[in-house]
């Protein structure tokens, strides 16, 4: 009987250890940014053939797409948009001062949130300025914490390039605060300005209609 008890105990320990290892591996899983394709291959893009530059916007608006994140951005009112900039020219372009705006159907102009904005929202979920409060009833403030893993994920995923070298593509995520907007993509477009060529001359502005994304066949993963 003693041998049976010890054998059972040993199996239990092995199960617990294995479970712990799996949990640690799952918790330590690092964010992997999607591999960017040439911008003109995305449904929602704008291409300037004469300037040899194309920019695409790929919204991550479904549970299937957002599962790459550990942060539930939708729950906190943010829309991740994967921005892709392709330079097919022979000279670099500067995007250090690039300005991006998501303009909704009702003409609201949204600019990308900074990591600090996102941290504040995650640590205090009720601090959503876009959510109307129907009654002036005092509510207990609920605060949370932002883990190092979440901070690393946000910073590593963010679009951070300052230039695009010849015949290369740069990409990354922009996060728009769409809290309180029922269908932020319908009838919306993204305007991009202040991109300059190697001589410092500003390129024509880019306008990306997001309806092209909504009307495109959804790829199955």
Image (spheres, helix red, strand yellow):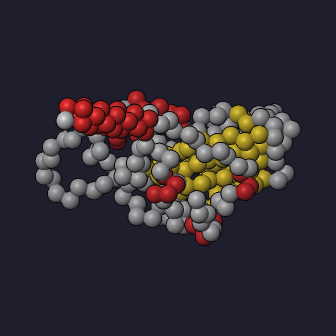
User: Is residue 135 positioned above or below 34 on the image?
Assistant: below
Seen at 52% across and 66% down, the residue is: 186
Task: Name the foreground residue: 79 vs 46.
Answer: 79
In x, y percent, where is residue 189? 58, 59
In x, y percent, where is residue 140? 15, 43
In x, y percent, where is residue 211? 59, 66
- Image position of 220 (left or right of 2): right
Seen at 56% across and 44% down, the residue is: 173
Q: Quadrant of the N terminus?
A: top left
Seen at 62% across and 53% down, the residue is: 57
Residue reaching furthest to the top: 148
- Image position of 176 (left or right of 56): left
- In which quadrant of the rendered view does residue 217 lie? bottom right
- In which quadrant of the rendered view does residue 209 lie? bottom right
- Image position of 161 (left or right of 31): right
Seen at 84% across and 42% down, the residue is: 89
Q: Quadrant of the C terminus?
A: bottom right
User: Across the whole image, how many numbered discs are drawn on residues?
Assistant: 0
Task: Name the foreground residue: 19 vs 7.
Answer: 7
Residue reaching furthest to the left: 138
- Image position of 42 (left or right of 121): right
Residue 197 can be seen in this image: no
Residue 98 can be seen in this image: yes
In x, y percent, where is residue 169? 72, 42
């Amino acid at each position: 009987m003693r041998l049976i008890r010890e054998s059972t105990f040993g199996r239990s320990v092995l199960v617990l250890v294995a479970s712990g290892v799996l949990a640690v591996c799952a918790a330590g899983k690092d964010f992997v940014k999607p591999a960017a394709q040439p911008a003109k291959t995305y449904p929602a893009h704008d291409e300037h053939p004469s300037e040899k530059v194309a920019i695409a916007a790929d919204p991550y608006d479904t549970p299937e797409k957002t599962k790459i994140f550990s942060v539930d951005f939708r729950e906190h009112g943010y829309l991740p948009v994967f921005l892709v900039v392709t330079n097919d020219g022979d000279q670099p372009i500067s995007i250090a001062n690039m300005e991006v705006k998501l303009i909704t159907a009702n003409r609201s102009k949204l600019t990308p949130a900074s990591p600090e904005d996102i941290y504040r929202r995650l640590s205090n979920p009720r601090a959503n300025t876009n959510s109307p409060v129907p009654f002036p009833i005092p509510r207990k403030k609920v605060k949370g914490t932002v883990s190092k893993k979440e901070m690393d994920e946000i910073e590593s995923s963010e679009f951070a390039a300052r230039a695009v070298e010849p015949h290369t593509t740069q990409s990354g995520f922009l996060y728009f605060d769409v809290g309180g907007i029922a269908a932020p993509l319908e009838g919306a477009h993204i305007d991009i300005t202040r991109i300059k060529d190697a001589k410092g001359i500003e390129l024509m502005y880019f306008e990306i209609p997001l309806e092209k994304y909504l009307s495109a066949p959804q790829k199955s993963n």
